[in-house]
Image (cartoon, rainbow, N blue to C red):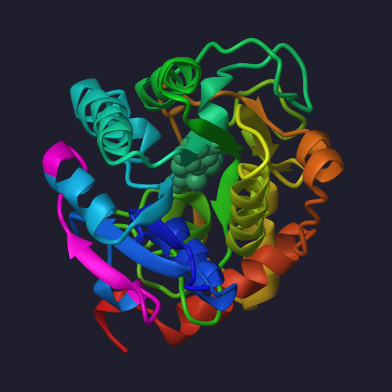
Amino acid sequence: MSPETILVTGGAGYIGSVVSAQLLERGYRVVIVDNFCHGHRAAIPAPSIVEELDIQDTERLAQVMRQYQVGAVMHFAAFIEVGESMRQPGRYFSNNTAGALSVLQAMVQAQVERFVFSSTAAVYGNPERTPITEEMELRPTNAYGESKLLVERMLPWFERIHGLRTARLRYFNASGNTPQRGEDHHPETHLIPLIMEAALGQRPQIAIYGEDYPTPDGTCIRDYVHVCDLASAHLLALEKLRECGNLLYNLGSGQGYSVRQVIEAVRQVSGRDFKVVSQERRPGDPAVLVASSAKIRRELGWKPRFESIEEIVASAWEWKVRHPQGYAAP
Ligand code: UFG
């Protein structure tokens, strides 16, 4: 039997490339769709097929799906910066919301039924309690979260009306690197890569955005989940969609670390010291986001392999030291 073909949008990006590598290892054929506005060609695992196009080009997308007889779509392509989404919300509603709609319409045209969607913990906003479970209220505090929530709301309609089977995976803070692939965003806005740049002397300091949150040390608490563990959850969801649709799972480690604790972990792992300064809060940042991932552990048997922030930071540091300029240089 020939291998099933999975279309991965954003497969040249941080999470999409790691998922693509795992799909190939598992024997799937992978077609990557990326417009390379942020993706890196060097991140693409061989032997993926690459189609350079924008997800808003519904007709071409449907054509690609038919051409390769795609069996399922994993949709990663999106803008991801919370801060930017609060300055330019339109960019997020266009690329993330309308972009996902275009992918769904192409799937309907090409009669592709299974869809795995990269959603986010940002859909919860400031949760009423932690750890956050999937049925808790959805009140995004930033346009990024809203842009993803709007997609989540479309999916049941596509299930009911067009017979799609969908999985919504709400990631908490994706982090860590694999030996081959790492986090390399331009501009970089994520905490761990920025601290590592400070540790390498590539930036003069790391700024803490707000030390007056209602948390033990006053800094925001997040749930860091390793990109390899995220990827393995995608493969489990993809398999489960053969049986049933309407899947919804949080993906986190269940443990929260404050910004100060993450800074300390990078100090320890790297053995380097660097300057830390205090800054204003970043608009749209919730104080605490920690997942309960009990549902996916119970229902799909997901077992994250990276359990502590030190392990995650160590994997990130190894790649960073070998690729100090990211994918741009050897
Ligand atoms: N932070 C700093 N200084 C920095 C950068 C970040 O203090 O230089 C703080 C932020 O204010 C936040 C925490 O570090 O409290 C983590 O910030 P990131 O930008 O690394 O990540 P976010 O939590 O804002 O967002 C990430 C993903 C989103 C996802 C969210 C879910 O980018 O896609 O995690 O928790 F929705």
View extreme (right): residue: 298
Instruction: Confirm whether residue 210 shows in the render.
Output: no
Q: Residue at x 46, y 16 (%)?
A: 153
Q: Position of residue 315 (x, y in %)?
A: 62, 73
Bounds of the magenta segment: 43-59
Residue 52 lies in the magenta stretch: yes
Q: Position of residue 149 (x, y in %)?
A: 45, 20
Does residue 41 lie above or below 104 as drawn?
below
Q: Is residue 231 left or right of residue 16?
A: right
View extreme (front): residue: 1
Q: Position of residue 241 (x, y in %)?
A: 61, 42
Could you tell me how many numbered marks the image carries?
0
Report the front residue among 202 and 170: 170
Q: Residue at x 26, y 73 (%)?
A: 41
Q: Residue at x 26, y 23 (%)?
A: 93
Q: Position of residue 62 (x, y in %)?
A: 22, 44
Does residue 48 lie above or below 119 as drawn?
below
